[in-house]
Image: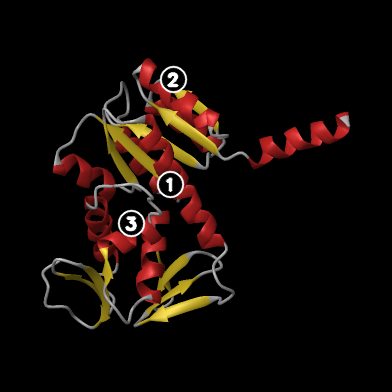
Amino acid sequence: MLQVVIIFFIEVIVLAQTIYIADDEKNIRELIANFLTNEGYQVTAFENGDELLAQFLVYPSDMVILDIMMDGTDGLSVCSMIRQKFNVPIIIVSARDSELDRITGISLGSDDYLVKPFSPLELVARVKAIFRRMSLDKKSDSVDNISYGNLTIDLKNRVLLMEGCPIQLTPTEYTLMVYLIKNSERAVSREELLKNVWHFDFDADSRVIDDVLKRLRKKIKDSDVKIESVWGFGFRIIKGVSDENH
């Protein structure tokens, strides 16, 4: 019986997804860590981005949560440095709520942007949604790849190729691209994307879609595939040049 219990706890430890947090506000850092730990995640909290980055480069985590304004290297810079080599999901948390700050965070590679003060339960929900989406992606159909125009997605290796050349995507960009291509015959609504790509089962700001799409459009601008807006509804992926000014 004791051996069974030991094996169970070892499996829990091995399977627990790891999350690194960097926030210079101790109360917020501990609050986030406590809520995520209670949900079964293995959490390590850091006082600043430099400490997190040093640890991450040695032992990468499954997710990173970063405050923007911290002593030393700011959160946006840490996000950018991580994103240069890793596709780990990144959530930015910040007291700065300007459109420029949000777009900058998303443009540098974050998968989500949450404004302080926020409910710890909302952060937990967003963390779960990202991990759930990644899990579903790994269980995708048995097809090895899908193509649209001169773009091909290698589903097994989670890579987007343009005429054989890889295009670096974040986890969110990848999932969005796969969904748009699989639904290329029709327009998809914002609500559908929030539910089926972001897997948000709560009311969420749909501006996050616009921010990620801006980044994705920029990455595929040299392809013969465009993502156009359907006014008042959502988006549609098309072949050929769109008249829309992206």
In the displayed structure, 24 sits above or below 237; it is above
- Residue 2 is situated, as x and y percent measured from the top left of the image, at 87, 29
Q: Residues within 10 Å of mark 2 (few under 14, many from 20)?
A: some
Residue 184 visible:
yes
Work out whether mark 1 precedes mark 3 in sequence or the reverse, and give the earlier one. 1
Q: Residues within 10 Å of mark 3 (few under 14, many from 20)?
A: some
Q: Quadrant of residue 30?
A: top left
Residue at the extreme top: 26
Residue 170 visible:
no
Label 2 element class: helix
In the displayed structure, 90 sits above or below 55; it is below
Q: Quadrant of residue 220?
A: bottom left
Q: Residue flagged by tag 2: what amino acid is it?
A: Glu
In front of the other: 44 or 200: 200
In front of the other: 12 or 158: 12
Q: Residue flagged by tag 1: what amino acid is it?
A: Pro
Q: Which residue is mark 3?
A: 194
Residue that appears at 32% across and 63% down:
192
Label 1 element class: loop
Q: Residue flagged by tag 3: what amino acid is it?
A: Leu
In the picture, the disc for residue 30 is 2
Q: Which residue is mark 1?
A: 89
